[in-house]
Image: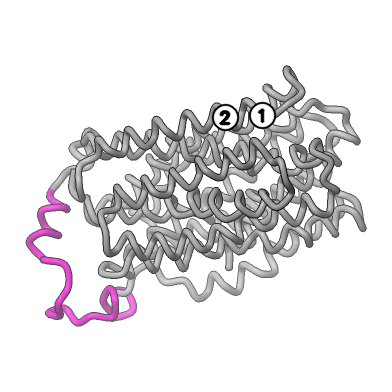
Amino acid sequence: MISLYVGSVVMFGFTAFFEPLIQEFGWSYTQVSFAASLRGMEMGIFAPLIGLFVDRLGQRKLLFAGVISTGLGLLILSSTQSLWTFYGAFLLLGLGAGGCLNVVTMTVIANWFRKNLGKALGVMSSGIGASGLFIPLIVFLIDSYGWRMALVILGAGMWIMSFPLLLIVRNTPEECGLYPDGDEPNSDGPDPAEEKQKSSLTFREIIRKKSFLILNMIDLIRVAAATAVLVHVMPYLSNLGVSRTAAGLIAAAIPVTSIAGRVGLGWLGDLWDKRYVMIFALLCMILGLLVFAYPTNKWMIFLFLLFFPSGFGSINVLRASYLRESFGKENFGKLLGITLGSGSVGGIIGPTSAGWAFDITGSYHFVWLGYVGVLIVGIILILNMDKHRA
């Protein structure tokens, strides 16, 4: 539920604020896009640090800090009068979102599950996917009350919804007298010797492994392509003549339709070689971008929604599952934090490059084709990853 709210307001919902901000302040597409890049950059800078703290302090404390920072960032953003205040508010939002999303929430799941980790991560990350359902509500709030009051409402809602939920969170099953998957200590599960071998690898040894380095490069590529689309989907569709209401519905459908990939391909990752499932996910993104670049008919948008969101959403799950399976849970938070930090570099490149290309050429067409080529490079990289343990 917390991921759902933060994902809708801070991640997917920003596209709804794009045009109102440009109309009021006269900023360029590049300037507004850079705010999303700042958010991604800070989330990336802090992700390894959050990973370190989550392994030492537990997830509940970091969730609490993240909820406070996110709500405060939204309130400050509502009072923006200058570009620098706008950027400063997004830095605070990036800090808060970093404490509410992937590193923290996925570490909770990695502590509670082993045998069905892919399925569990898929279900948990569906909260982020379902956040698209909030985008029409965000558009309604902006159109009815103005973008400033909409941010005030969303900031207050963050606190009202999240604080009661934090009382439920528990860091590990052991602190409740339970065991992962609900098993007993001597029940069938992963081979204890194998688990011990994974945990015997030091943190420095793991980060030098070829598969870990490639996984970081894959996440950079995936996030760059995904954020370019997510931030610019509404202005892109507007330039194609799609109404603001319809564009908002399409933007809302992107994270929602990603649920199929998060759950379905996460489940397949428990059964098959995760490398090949990730390749299939990148192929889905490629097909979706090609359709997005050549929308000769309106119905082709449905093909885009069928393929692209499932692809980028599922890799978010498969990445964490691969880390847990290959290196154990002892350093999971730190490793996931580093991987998210690498992905945030893509989060800087994606929205800014798309905005820059539009300012220069007046079109997004070559941006989408360029990212098709980048995703093909990603497939080649995955073929060079080792199976399971690096």
User: The residue under label 2 is which amino acid type?
Assistant: Leu
Q: Which residue is mark 1?
A: 365
Q: Residue at x 59, y 49 (%)?
A: 96
Dot 1: few (<14), some (14–19), or many (≥20) neighbours within 10 Å? Answer: some
Can you see residue 68?
Answer: no
Q: Residue at x 41, y 56 (%)?
A: 317
Residue 212 disc label: none
Task: Write the start and end of the magenta stretch as one range.
Answer: 174-200
Q: Which residue is mark 2?
A: 369
Residue 179's place in the image compared with 361, above or below, is: below
x, y (%) of residue 154? 75, 58
Residue farthest to the front, as pictured: 296
Decide if residue 293 is on the left or right side of residue 370: right
Q: Quadrant of residue 5?
A: bottom right
**Along the line of sight, which residue is nearer the eye, 295 or 24?**
295
Residue 169's place in the image compared with 129, above or below, is: below
Residue 124's place in the image compared with 240, above or below, is: below
**Along the line of sight, which residue is nearer the eye, 241 or 105?**
241
Q: Residue at x 15, y 45 (%)?
A: 201
User: The residue under label 1 is which amino acid type?
Assistant: His
Secondary element at tag 1 = helix
The count of marks equals: 2
Decide if residue 313 is on the left or right side of residue 191: right
**Along the line of sight, which residue is nearer the eye, 183 or 170?**
183
Query: Is residue 27 in the magenta section?
Result: no
